[in-house]
Amino acid sequence: MEFHQNRKALTETAMIATLTSIFVVSTFYIPLLSILLALIPMPFMVLAVRRGSRYAFFALVMVTLIIGLLTGVIYSLFALVIFGPMALAMGWWIRHRKEPHEVIFIGAVGSAAAIFTMMQLIAMASGIQLTLEISQMITGIMEQQAAALQQMNLEVVALEEAVHYLLLVFPGLILIQSLFGAFVNYYLTMAVLRRFTPSEEPLPEFSRFRLPGHVVSGVFLLMALSWGSQFIHGINHISLLANVTLIAVMIFFMQGISLISYWIKGTRVPKWVRLVILVILVILSPMITLISLLGLVDVLADFRKLTVSK
């Protein structure tokens, strides 16, 4: 019996590694598929939950070797470092029935830590500071296109301020990207497990996602500490406060969009209509602040009464 289970696990491992490798290599020939690279952790998370973290690790190693042979070592190591920690950490935590916000948090931390580590390694190995390179590249483009920008009624100074702000919140943007990636991969993994893996306990649904109540006090404490850091020499309190604010908006946005999904689900509209509405709300940037405020209020008021239901 155990031999049969191990053989099935190895078969799943080989299948996931092969299909993932084919997909990654195909992005070289179909660049449009590159936007889906953020979903690479999902199959390894499913494998970790179904068969264990060691099989997910074996699959990651196999994908790294295959991609390395077909495309080069750098691209394969990039995929392993960026997506490996998120997939293994989140898969292990899901397997051990951790709360959704805990799984998403550990996945985001693992991904962000991997990205920052990779940037530091690149800087140490080549002496290239990525943020400085990006800043110089954008500045050079703006200088070359200054006349065209003026014809479009765009002020070069305003664009320079926008670039300066983006560089200011660059660490926060990486954390948000990691947080959003962990969020999406978690609920896609839950959808796959709900369909193909029998479970005695109901698996978490996106419409019932809820942040812990103490997150509000934690966010305001971080903001207060960021503001107070202006009295400490050597700390850029403006950058720190901007990054904390950006991350807080994203955290409460997740709660707000989950609440909206819950309300739409109560109207019994088709699932695809609910998905389209949610995607539109995510894309519409003016709605992000309003949805984040809605999420903040929901953390405090618990409109869905999820605490009581638990």
Image (cartoon, helix red, strand yellow):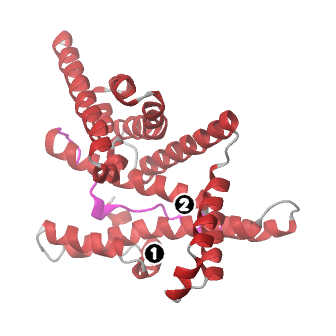
Quadrant where the image shows the N terminus: top left
Q: Which residue is drawn at 54% across and 55% down?
A: 174
Q: Is the magenta stretch mostly helix, strand or loop?
A: loop
Q: Is residue 71 left or right of residue 10?
A: right
| Amino acid type at image mark 1 | Ser
Q: Can residue 62 be seen in this view?
A: yes
Location of residue 245 in the rendering, given as x and y in whole percent from the top left corner: 60, 70
Of residues 163 and 305, the one nearer the viewer is 163
Image disc number at residue 36: none
Q: Mark 1 points at which residue?
A: 292
Residue 35 to residue 232: above or below:
above
Q: Does the magenta stretch include residue 211?
A: yes
Dot 2 or dot 1: first in sequence order is: 2
In the image, residue 254 lies in the stretch drawn in magenta:
no
Amino acid found under the numbered disc labelled 2: Leu
| Residue name at image x 59 percent, y 70 percent | 144
Locate residue 38 relative to residue 197 in the image: left or right. Answer: right
Image coordinates of residue 84 in percent, x first then y, are 43, 35
Residue 147's image quarter?
Answer: bottom right
Tell me if 225 is positioned left or right of 105 in this view. Answer: right
Q: Nearer the viewer, residue 45 or 156?
A: 156
Do we see residue 304 in this rendering? no
**Over which residues does the magenta segment extend?**
197-221
Q: At x 33% / y 26%, what residue is drawn?
A: 59
> Which residue bears the numbered disc 2?
173
How far apart marks 2 and 1 lie (CA) works out to 16 Å
Give how far across and how far down residue 166 sits, in percent: 60, 67
At label 1, counting other C-alpha atoms closer than 10 Å, the crowd grade (few under 14, some 14-19, many 20 or more) is many
Vertical order, 251 against 92 (above or below): below
Instruction: Choose top left, top right, bottom left or bottom right for residue 215.
Output: bottom right
- Rendered location of residue 32, percent (x, y): 29, 54
**Residue placed most toward the observer, 118 or 89:** 118
